Image (cartoon, rainbow, N blue to C red):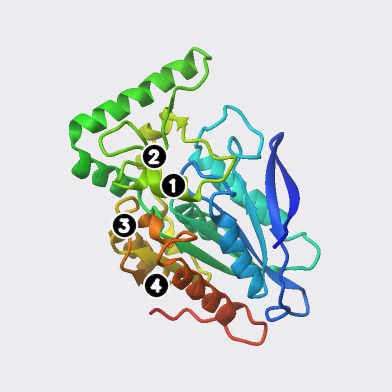
Amino acid sequence: MTSTRIQVQVDGDTIVARRFGAVSDALTGPAGRPCVVMAHGFGATQDSGLFAFAEALAGAGAEVVTFDYRNFGESSGQPRQLVSLGGQVADYRAVIDHARRLDGVDPARIVAWGVSLAGGHVIRVAADDPQLAGVISLTPAADGLSVVSEMLRTFGPWHMLRVMAWGIRDVAAQLRRRPPVLIPIVGAPGEVAGLGAEGAVDEMLRIAGPTWRNEFAARMVLVMGNHRPIASAKRVRCPALVQIADLDRTAPPAAATTAATRMRATVHHYPCDHFDVYPGAEWHERVVEDQVRFLERMLVPSAPLDRATT
């Protein structure tokens, strides 16, 4: 499936996005077609597994817009490889606003889609945007404190101190106006990296696209505990689908379950790990099927909105 390159301007930077046109009229209404806006997780780019999700949802009748956050992939922004929690949420809002103005898109039927870290971002976005038609949150990192606690439990305090030391070095470099201190996004267990679960390196390399780089500005590790979409979940009013990997060693499933309960979301559980939902993995097709059914249920113009929980 081909896509169209589009650009969104945010504070002097350019977000590069891809539009996948609907290939079915199943969800088309008098005002146009629904649009799903999606972005990736921690340090990942849109060419690293997102396009397969986009093509599947476009096949079901939705317009889909994928994008790279500022500082990553095809988008502009400095310094490169800097994960900004607030900045990424702002990027979502900007792309959603742009999607509402696209030709053929029904502005009242916009869905925010996110995976991993972005699975938390879309909760925050939905909490502050009552006009959203829906949310899909896949294997969400819903609570940064839970992520940090899981890393501490798995790798121990000495490892956490090593990681934090690199974060402090990066902050010091920032204060001296020097380039960021970069550490790997994924690494082997025990290595200084953002994600260190067994097998994470191989799984990420399997889906990585040409613009992905295995590095990020280390200062992010000092603020991960501030990533708390779970605190906003109760304010989400639109229909939501939360898809939880029960064996997830990266995004704690208990926090995702709590957030989903507060959102009164439709919930699907899968007996798999964090990376098992991506293209080519065992649970990808099932995850996509559940997303399509969710969209069909809530976005068909003649169908009532449904907030059922499964």
Which is closer to the viewer, label 4 or label 1?
1
Sequence-wise, the earlier of marks 3 and 2 is 2
Report the residue at 42% width, 22% height from top: 170
Q: Nearer the viewer, residue 260 or 7?
A: 7
Report the residue at 40% width, 79% height from top: 309
Q: Is 187 left or right of 33, judged from the image as shown?
A: left
Q: CA distance from mark 1 to mark 3?
A: 15 Å
Mark 3, residues whose alpha carbon is within 10 Å: few (<14), some, or many (≥20)? Answer: many
Looking at the picture, which amino acid does disc 1 mark?
Answer: Met
Q: Is residue 239 visible?
A: no
Residue 27 screen position, x and y as percent: 68, 78
Please name the residue that numbered disc 3 is placed on. 248
Sequence-wise, the earlier of marks 4 and 1 is 1
User: What secondary structure is found at the residue carrying circle 1?
Assistant: helix
Q: Is 7 left or right of 302, judged from the image as shown?
A: right
Q: Is 166 left or right of 33, judged from the image as shown?
A: left
User: What secondary structure is found at the residue carrying circle 4?
Assistant: strand
Please name the residue that numbered disc 4 is placed on. 267
User: What secondary structure is found at the residue carrying circle 3?
Assistant: loop
Which is closer to the viewer, label 1 or label 3?
1
CB under 8 Å between discs 2 and 4: no
Q: Which mark is residue 186?
A: 2
Sequence-wise, the earlier of marks 2 and 4 is 2
Looking at the picture, which amino acid does disc 4 mark?
Answer: Val
Please name the residue that numbered disc 1 is placed on. 204
Looking at the picture, which amino acid does disc 2 mark?
Answer: Val
CB under 8 Å between discs 1 and 2: yes
Looking at the picture, which amino acid does disc 3 mark?
Answer: Asp
